[in-house]
Image (cartoon, rainbow, N blue to C red):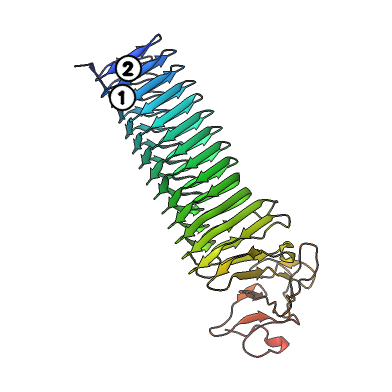
Amino acid sequence: GGIFIEKSQALDPGGNESVRGPELVISHSAVDRNRAGLRGGGVFAWESSISMTGGVSIQLNYAFYDGGGLFIYKSPAQMDGVLISANEAEVSGGGFLMELCHVVLQDTRLIGNYVKSGGGGIRAKGGELTMRGCTIEGCFVLEGSGGGVFLSDAAMNASHSALSGCHSESDGGGIYAIDATFDLTMVVVHNSRSSGNGGAVSVQSSSMSMTGGAYTGNTAGGSGGGIHCKGSIAQITEVTIGQGIAEDGAGAGVENCTLDMTQVLMEGNNATTGGGLKVECGSTTVHNSTLRENSASHNGAAVADACSDRPHLLRLQEVSVTSNTVADSGSVFFEELHPSADVLMDGLKFERNGLGNIYWIVQKGFEERGVVCTGCTSDGPLYMTQFVASVVYQDGGVARSPISSNSGQVVEPALTFQVHDYYGNLVKAPTGRTLAVYPSILAVDGVSRSSRSGQVCAASPAGSAACGTTRPRPRDQFPDR
């Protein structure tokens, strides 16, 4: 029973079904292997309404422009139990494109749809998309964003749905949103990837809410293996973000967002910087959450704060930081914090973390307040600090690292190392502590010198630099290796 339409072609809209009002109703039917010269490879609806129920399949259709399976314009649509599979569009909406309308999907599957530009599964331009109990799987964007879903100037409400194995060559392997508003409740995004930012979700200039669900096994070539947030407002509650991989912020990469995370589990994520979370300015609050078994090959296995050029806010409250590993410095890492940065850490619990729990670089005056963690506990040293020193040439110029002479200049054998705060005042060691500067590479006449095996190159309080166990004579400051 029903309708079976196959291998139809149209130069204009709708390779198969084309309707311009008042209503299109399809049930127990198949719309397969059709082609459209512009939009709507399988179905085209313009200022109409659509109802699809009871075993409808839309498969292997092609549109030269938008909507490989369906193109829906100003047409409210309801799809219940529909299969939208292996459709293709050259520009937007491999599965379907909706514009300026409300589309409701119930128990609907979008599988293996493909597009070159944006929205491998769904492209929503304006309007509202509702998804309940739906699956988006293996959808692909060749050049653009939104492997599963691409939202712009639109709203989305998705619940008890899953996206898996989707891919985009730009941002948002699972979901990409710009100038949009969306709520995700008990949604799972798994094994999706983007070559840019946001393996699972990438949100820009938008408002996002996530409640429950899991974002696991996702990969990004840039920031945010799980979630990437840029210039947006985001609330994440009772969510698991795990096994993500990214260059920065494998769990979440945050750029100038207002982000609130409550009862979030970040585990098993891996990045160069910020294994769990990387923050680049904005306002970020994490409380009653757990960051465990995350890793970074550089800094910040659990959290990396990389906002050094402007004031920002970071709150870490009642957070468990456990079994995180870092190759360079710190489970919680701060990079040259701005003097007006507002940082609060309270009630953190550190256990079994490698190479420092809280690590910060002091350069711009933040050393006057320090990074304070109130009510925090640790099974090892709580703080580590790196003071950034200046090396001054004889003529007053400042050397960069590694130290080398410029043309016509000679670095004097005796180098003066001093640590100054943002206002130019000499930093003194706290009572009962020793302040030391350890240069890793020195040079004379433009040739780098490193410490020999078993030796230490250090700067003494008097200003001389030496390698060895005894104080060298002035002419022996840089002995041959």
Using the rendered image of the protein, determine whether residue 447 is visible from the camera's viewpoint: yes
Residue 160 at x, y = what percent? Answer: 38, 37
Q: Which mark is residue 403?
A: none
Question: What residue sits right under mark 2 in the picture?
Answer: 15
In this rendering, is residue 242 above or below 328? above
Residue 467 at x, y = what percent? Answer: 63, 84
The answer to which quarter of the image holds residue 397 is bottom right
Q: In screen coordinates, is 256 left or right of 291?
A: right
In this rendering, is residue 298 above or below 105? below
Q: Residues within 10 Å of mark 2 (few under 14, many from 20)?
A: many
Residue 139 at x, y = what percent? Answer: 36, 36
In this rendering, is residue 439 above or below 261? below
Are the residues tagged 2 and 1 within 8 Å (C-beta)? yes
Which amino acid, by three-letter code, is at mark 1? Asn
SS for callout 2: loop
Which amino acid, by three-letter code, is at mark 2? Gly
Question: What residue sits right under mark 1 in the picture?
Answer: 61
User: Nearest the camera: 64 or 226?
Assistant: 226
Residue 277 at x, y = what percent? Answer: 53, 54
Sequence-first disc among 2 and 1: 2
The answer to which quarter of the image holds residue 35 is top left
User: Where the N terminus falls, by quadrant?
Assistant: top left
The answer to which quarter of the image holds residue 442 is bottom right
**Residue at the limit of the structure toward the left, as seen here:** 1
User: Nearest the camera: 336 or 468?
Assistant: 336
